[in-house]
RNA sequence: UGGGGUGUCGCCAAGUUGGUAAGGCACAAGGUUUUGAUCCUUGCAUGCGCAGGUUCGAGUCCUGCCACCCCAGCCA
């Protein structure tokens, strides 16, 4: 496989395009488009489509247009337009033209009139229920509408009056005259214009009839000179219609529609309707909730654009059903952050530890590497003093040999510091450990103690300099791997632990961290500053992903 | 029982004219390690949905089955 991150790995679409270019089709041009409907936020499935369409066009020196498919004013809004542009830019893609289907409303209308004139379209006055009835079923052919043979003049008159606003919604619809007995339901006289007395976020109240997807999309592609129109498998059945319209209209540019399978990620949902439901029902904290697979959510969680593109590269492009494991995504961000993230100490569940053989005022400045393998990332100093914090999970009153951390009476090394020994503990009246009293061995900095082996290393923070932080830890949003194919209601499938928070401590340097920064809390995972809730005097930190943890498995047996 | 698709390791996925099954993730076992991380080494489909056939040779060709997905919005 091609491992160059700058290039799309080989896939069936790329192969097909390579052949087109080789044969000189479209004068060797490769022009694509990304056509979101501005009715929701983009998610990681869109990232796959983005990587494909933008990636291919770029590789073949073509261009990609961003086109908002805004033909349904009742569902769309400009707030989504802005969010979508933001997400695409964040991923690092540059579109040639920013277009909207609504830019073509006049042209679309004229083309529709032409089809009426050529007796290839007619105004149907059946109501929605009747239209459904007449359409037939999957196994039975449909039958012609009684209005199908209206004279051209009457169709034209009616269509113009639809446009003029003379009719109520649902009264009439413009349909293509194709074949009511086609085995492909999409060819059974599809509706291409409906009446909607709704203002459009771009065209205002200029129109009260709006063209529908099948009619709009192919023509928009054609107008823009798109050569390869990539979409997901659900449009495969629409391709004959796509081609029919462009052929009947004798459009000079006839793009090729190619379908690929959409991305499915385990333990989450990708459908726009479903994501909206999570947002609307306040199951999550808006479209940018870090648990969501939306690009805004992933960004807020701390995923980088590069890691998402790498993920898309790794999952590939095919026509087969796929259910990608979350581990694949996590691996991408870990691989990147392992190299780039600076290391810091962060204590999630603090417990105080007192060094008894150190004075109150004693301070030993310790040098800590910002990255164990990259000296150029420099060092920092942390003051070791007689009161420090460690994580509760790193201490046990008793434990078996497998436990490598601090045990009462045992020794452990403080990361980049001394070896300490747990002498005794202090408990509160309800039995909770409130303090661990330790001694430290001054002769163990940077070297092993004489005659003993210290197996464990734990992270720590000086109590004096520790900065409190609100830390968000995430787990899968859903408790089942395929929420879509589970019969139960969403509310029953949400993982109650998808978000857990703790009040921990971090190094002072994080006060100055920016939203772009990512860091590794040693032994814990990769974290970032929450872009919406954090401030220098009240840090909110999100865990992007935990470090791989082979201990967790051992501990459970 | 109509039409359109898809079936290669637990997951993703190469496999372009038939020539003797890439790679990634995950997992397992060793080694290194002041992160139970990283890194390194090794292992992981006599098998390509099933059954036949053609062929010296088939994941790749032929035939017949089976399974799963999508389509009956005046949504996109």
Image (cartoon, grey):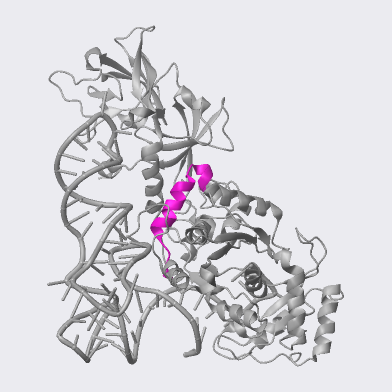
**Residue at 40%, 37% in the rendered image:** A340
By secondary structure, the bulk of the magenta-drawn segment is best described as helix
Magenta span includes A300: yes
- Residue A234 visible, this orientation: no
Frontmost residue, A546 versus A251: A251
Residue A220 coordinates in the image, percent (x, y): 66, 69
**Which picture quadrant has residue A252?**
bottom right
User: Which quarter of the figure is the N terminus of chain A placed in?
Assistant: bottom left
**Which picture quadrant has residue A377?**
top left
Residue A102 coordinates in the image, percent (x, y): 72, 64
**Residue at 22%, 22% in the rendered image:** A409
**Residue at 67%, 75% in the rendered image:** A215
**Residue range corresponding to the magenta coloring:** A298-321
- Left or right: A314 with respect to B49? right
Frontmost residue, A94 versus A139: A94
**Which picture quadrant has residue A207?**
bottom right
Q: In the picture shown, does residue A35 fall above or below A441?
A: below
**Residue at 81%, 80% in the rendered image:** A159
Q: In the picture shown, does residue A118 fall above or below B26?
A: below
Residue A552 coordinates in the image, percent (x, y): 30, 42
Magenta span includes A182: no
């Amino acid at each position: 496989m091609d491992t160059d991150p700058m290039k799309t790995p080989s896939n069936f679409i790329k192969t097909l395009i390579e052949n087109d270019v080789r044969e000189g089709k479209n004068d060797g041009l490769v022009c694509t488009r990304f056509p979101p409907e501005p009715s929701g936020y983009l998610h990681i499935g869109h990232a796959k489509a983005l990587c494909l369409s933008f990636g291919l066009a770029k590789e073949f020196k073509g261009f990609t247009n961003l086109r908002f498919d805004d033909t349904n004013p009742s569902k769309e809004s400009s707030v989504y337009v802005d969010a979508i542009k933001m997400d695409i830019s964040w991923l690092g893609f540059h579109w040639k033209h920013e277009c909207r289907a609504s830019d073509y409303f006049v042209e679309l209308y004229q083309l529709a009139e032409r089809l009426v004139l050529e007796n290839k379209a007619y105004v149907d006055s059946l109501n929605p229920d009747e239209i459904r009835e007449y359409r037939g079923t999957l196994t039975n052919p449909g039958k012609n509408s009684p209005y199908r043979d209206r004279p051209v003049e009457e169709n034209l008159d009616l269509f113009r009056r639809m446009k003029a606003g003379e009719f109520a919604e649902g009264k009439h619809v413009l349909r293509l005259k194709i074949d009511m007995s086609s085995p492909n339901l999409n060819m059974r006289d599809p509706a291409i214009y409906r009446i909607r007395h709704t203002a459009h976020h771009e065209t205002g109240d200029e129109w009260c009839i709006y063209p529908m997807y099948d009619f709009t999309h192919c023509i928009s592609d054609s107008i823009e000179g798109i050569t390869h129109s990539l979409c997901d498998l659900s449009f495969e059945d629409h391709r004959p219609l796509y081609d029919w319209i462009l052929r009947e209209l004798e459009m000079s540019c006839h793009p090729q529609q190619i379908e690929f399978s959409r991305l499915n990620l385990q333990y989450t949902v990708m459908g726009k309707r479903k994501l909206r439901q999570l947002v609307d029902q306040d199951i999550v904290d808006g479209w940018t909730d870090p648990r969501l697979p939306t690009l805004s959510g992933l960004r807020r969680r701390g995923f980088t654009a590069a890691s998402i593109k790498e993920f898309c590269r790794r999952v590939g492009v095919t026509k087969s059903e796929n259910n990608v494991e979350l581990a694949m995504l996590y691996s991408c961000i870990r691989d990147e952050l392992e190299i780039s993230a600076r290391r810091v100490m962060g204590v999630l569940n603090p417990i105080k530890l007192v060094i008894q053989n150190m004075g109150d005022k004693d301070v030993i400045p310790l040098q800590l590497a910002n990255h164990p393998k990259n000296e150029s990332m420099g060092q920092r100093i942390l003051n070791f003093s007689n009161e420090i914090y460690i994580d509760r999970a790193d201490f046990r009153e008793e434990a078996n040999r497998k436990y490598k951390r601090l045990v009462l009476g045992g020794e452990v090394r403080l990361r980049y510091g001394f070896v300490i020994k747990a002498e005794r503990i202090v408990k509160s009246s309800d039995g909770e450990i409130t303090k661990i009293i330790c001694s430290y061995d001054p002769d163990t900095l940077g070297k092993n103690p004489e005659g003993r082996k210290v197996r464990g290393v734990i992270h720590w923070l000086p109590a004096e300099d520790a900065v409190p932080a609100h830390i968000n830890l995430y787990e899968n949003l859903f408790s089942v791997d395929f929420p879509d194919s589970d019969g139960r209601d969403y509310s029953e499938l949400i993982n109650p632990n998808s978000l857990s928070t703790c009040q921990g401590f971090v190094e002072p340097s994080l006060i100055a961290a920016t939203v772009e920064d990512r860091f590794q809390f040693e032994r814990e995972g990769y974290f970032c500053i929450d872009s919406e809730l954090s401030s220098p005097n009240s840090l909110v930190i999100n865990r992007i992903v935990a470090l791989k943890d082979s201990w967790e498995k051992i501990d459970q047996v």
